[in-house]
Image: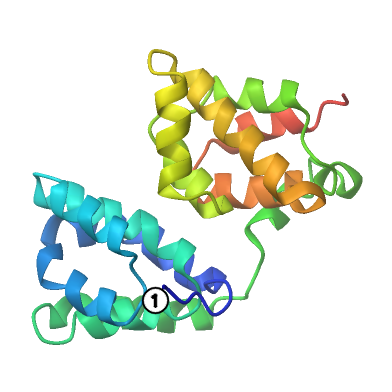
């Protein structure tokens, strides 16, 4: 059974987002996953999903999108896995971590405070807002809902239930997140994940600053 040991630090989430394409273009994930599995950060089912991906870049992107959901230990364990075969990529992670420590820490959703009031950020988003949001998202929706806490099996179910309608798949995932987290499924936490996925802030503001 995998061990999460608390949420991944915000700075580590940002680093993985910032370096996502750079890492994916150079990694050979097959050389890393056994170590990460032994460290109990990958489940058996996810390990099989990674191996089933035909392209190296797709394997890497899948792993990088999955790591933020695996808890505080995931980032240092990922960095350790690079030590022997990809030392230059490990150095890039260390450089970005040093840079992050020099920057003033800030919650990603803080930048929305100027346009979205606190009382709205603390609310649970309505199905109407989630439907509106779903119409503005593309392939990045999977990263967003995994960051919110859904499992790969949840995504698969949403896709199978709405095979020919991307917006319906996304909406189903958001509603599942809202049902599962209850009062913790706030506009604030959703905005956090949207910003990490580099969703257009203008879209976020347009959807959530309006009263329901």
Q: Nearer the viewer, residue 49 or 106?
A: 49
- Quadrant in the picture for the N terminus: bottom left
The extreme right residue here reads 119
Residue 170 in the image: above or below residue 24: above
Q: Look at the image and tell me whether residue 70 can be seen.
A: yes
Counting labels gives 1
Considering only vertical position in the picture, is 86 above or below 45? below
For residue 150, side relative to residue 117 (left or right): left
Q: Quadrant of residue 47?
A: bottom left
209 in relation to 29, above or below: above
Q: Position of residue 120 (x, y in %)?
A: 86, 41
Q: Residue at x 26, y 85 (%)?
A: 80
Q: Secondary structure at mark 1?
A: helix
Q: Looking at the picture, does residue 106 appear above or below residue 64?
A: below
Q: Quadrant of residue 212?
A: top right
Residue situated in front as seen by the camera: 117 or 28: 28
Furthest toward the top, the residue is: 164
Q: Which residue is mark 1?
A: 75
Depth order, front residue of 42/102: 42
Question: Can see residue 21?
Answer: no
Residue 32's x, y, as percent?
Answer: 17, 73
Q: Name the spot of residue 209 as percent of width and height, x first.
A: 80, 32
Residue 179 is left or right of residue 67, and the answer is right
Q: Residue at x 41, y 67 (%)?
A: 15
Colouring mode (rainbow / by chain / secondary structure / one colour): rainbow
Mark 1 Cα shell of 10 Å, populated few (<14), some (14-19), many (≥20): many
The residue at the point 32 percent across, 82 percent down is 39
The residue drawn where x is 55% and y is 76% is 103
């Amino acid at each position: 059974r995998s061990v999460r040991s608390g949420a991944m630090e915000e700075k580590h989430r940002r680093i993985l987002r910032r370096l996502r394409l750079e890492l994916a273009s150079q990694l050979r994930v097959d050389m890393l996953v056994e170590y990460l599995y032994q460290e109990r950060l990958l489940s058996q089912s996810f390990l099989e999903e990674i191996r089933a991906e035909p392209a190296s870049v797709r394997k890497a992107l899948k792993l990088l999108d999955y790591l933020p959901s695996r808890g505080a230990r995931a980032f240092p364990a990922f960095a350790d896995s690079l030590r022997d075969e990809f030392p230059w990529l490990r150095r890039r992670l260390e450089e970005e971590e040093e840079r992050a420590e020099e920057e003033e820490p800030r919650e990603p959703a803080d930048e929305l405070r100027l346009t979205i009031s606190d009382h709205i950020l603390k609310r649970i988003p309505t199905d109407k807002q989630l439907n509106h949001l779903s119409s503005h998202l593309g392939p990045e929706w999977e990263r967003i809902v995994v960051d919110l806490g859904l499992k790969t099996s949840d995504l698969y179910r949403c896709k199978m239930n709405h095979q020919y309608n991307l917006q319906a798949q996304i909406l189903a995932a958001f509603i599942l997140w809202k049902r599962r987290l209850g009062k913790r499924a706030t506009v604030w936490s959703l905005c956090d994940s949207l910003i990490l996925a580099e969703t257009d802030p203008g879209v976020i503001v347009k959807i959530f600053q309006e009263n329901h």
